[in-house]
Amino acid sequence: MRLRCKTALWLAGSVFFFAGMNAGTVRDNGAVGADSTKVDSVEAEPDPASVVDEVIWVVGDEPILLSDVENTRLQGEYEGIKWQGNPDCTIPEQLAVQKLFLHQAAIDSIEVSESEVAQSVEDQINYWIQSVAGSKEKLEEYKNMSISELRQTLHDDFRDRLLINREREQLVEDITVSPADVRRYFDALPEDSLPIVPTEVEVQIITRTPRVEQSEIDRIKNELREYTERVTKGETSFATLARLYSEDPGTAHQGGEFQDYVGRGVLDPTFANVAFNLTDPNKISKIVETEYGFHIIQLIDKRGDRIKVRHILRKPKVTQESIDFAKSQLDSIAGDIRAGKISFDRAAGLISDDKDTRNNNGLMANRGNDGRMTSRFQMRSLPSEVARVVDTLKVGEVSAPFQMISEKNGRTVCAVVRLKNRVETHRATITEDFQVMKDIVLAKRKEEFITNWIKEKIKNTYVRINERYKNCDFQYEGWIR
């Protein structure tokens, strides 16, 4: 069960493995203040054959190791990343900029939760498995470590990424642009420089959740009762069973544990009601049913209105017969809509199981770059199963029933969709695409602010750079003075 939405990573695709400092080569390692303005070069290089690892930059009081750069380069090769300019210069500078943001995040008391870190690591591993390695076994073979070891290796780096993202967001949160700013910017652009707006669609959806057989529910509940009995008898621990059997990808590898203390607001209400009534860490809750499946919960600690718990989630399986029955219901509904017996809008309100769209005539909604909800989707932003079907429809057409996995709870659902509107790829216009244009101008203004902030931060931060980097053509001035 995910407590929070995914967080976009600032340096997507680049993974940094921060090695321990086994043998630094900087002779003067005295403490330095993070706000000192002194910039030095490191003394003469040692014999490379004698170096286990090497401090090549120091930013504030944070070292950048040669191993950091090499691991970043290797990771980039694995993912097909093309570095701009000379990687020997680009990568250390990129790491140095990260140090500036992390230093500021510490000053500003920026925090990220362990559940956010764990989910981001899990998302990255799943991406590698699906898009790069092809299987968990091949990923483990390439990395020369188990998935569990890989999670531990990635933890600190992804925590830093999230902190950097959070700090960047805070720095630019008050930046705005007016309609006049947008018009002035685009009035100055020649027509062939106007941005291309990808195809956007508006989609209505009706879903039916296949019925789970009572025998399957009984099977799941009996397994959960067995887990409870085994823990109560001392045969095993709750955490061990969670690692073995829980179907929550965000917590299973952590023994079912939500790593941070959470309030009621981030939990499913039914789950929260049971979890917050637990008082004894040695007792296991009754079986709890939520939209995600069936759970048992164990209290770890409680602090005021926040708790830390672990849980085991089991998801009941639906039979093909149930899936076929749900599809037949939807096929009948779609036929009535096409025949004009009922509108799609009314059918969605009366029949659909999807709580998020049912009261909006089945219209799917998407969160735009400005954080506001919009009914327009680029095709890549739709769930993949929906996008494949929508791509075959004309405006006003209703699809045949199809099967999909809910992004919200990971359960099997059946659906029909109607393509309400399609706006083909075109050059942006101020009348039709004002929000797109505003997003571009706002992003440009934020990036200019961040660039200027980095330049000022460099001026007021202690930096030591190895002699061999002094001739680099850096993106930002001021590293060497």
Image: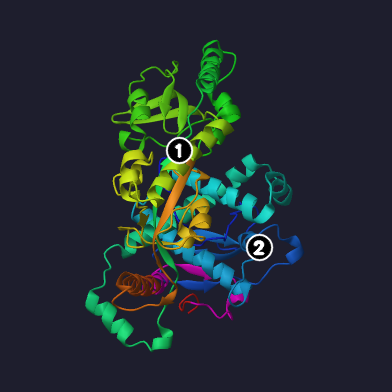
Q: Position of residue 142 (x, y in %)?
A: 72, 51
Residue at x 38%, y 89% (from the top left corner): 190
Note whether 24 is above or below 255 in the view shown. below
Q: Is residue 268 magenta?
A: no
Residue 234 position by quadrant:
top right
Q: Amino acid at mark 2?
A: Glu
Q: Is residue 296 left or right of residue 368?
A: right
Q: Is residue 157 left or right of residue 420?
A: right
Left or right: residue 182 compared with residue 256: left
Rate crowding at label 2 as few (under 14), some (14 to 19) or many (20 or more) other CA atoms within 10 Å: some
Residue bearing the label numbered 1: 329
On the image, the x and y values in percent for residue 290 come to 41, 30
Residue 108 image point, x, y percent = 33, 55
The residue beneath circle 2 is 70
Q: Is residue 3 visible?
A: yes
Residue at coordinates 44% horizontally, 20% vertically from top-left?
287
Q: Which residues are magenta?
A: 452-475
Of helix, strand and loop, which one carries label 1? Answer: helix
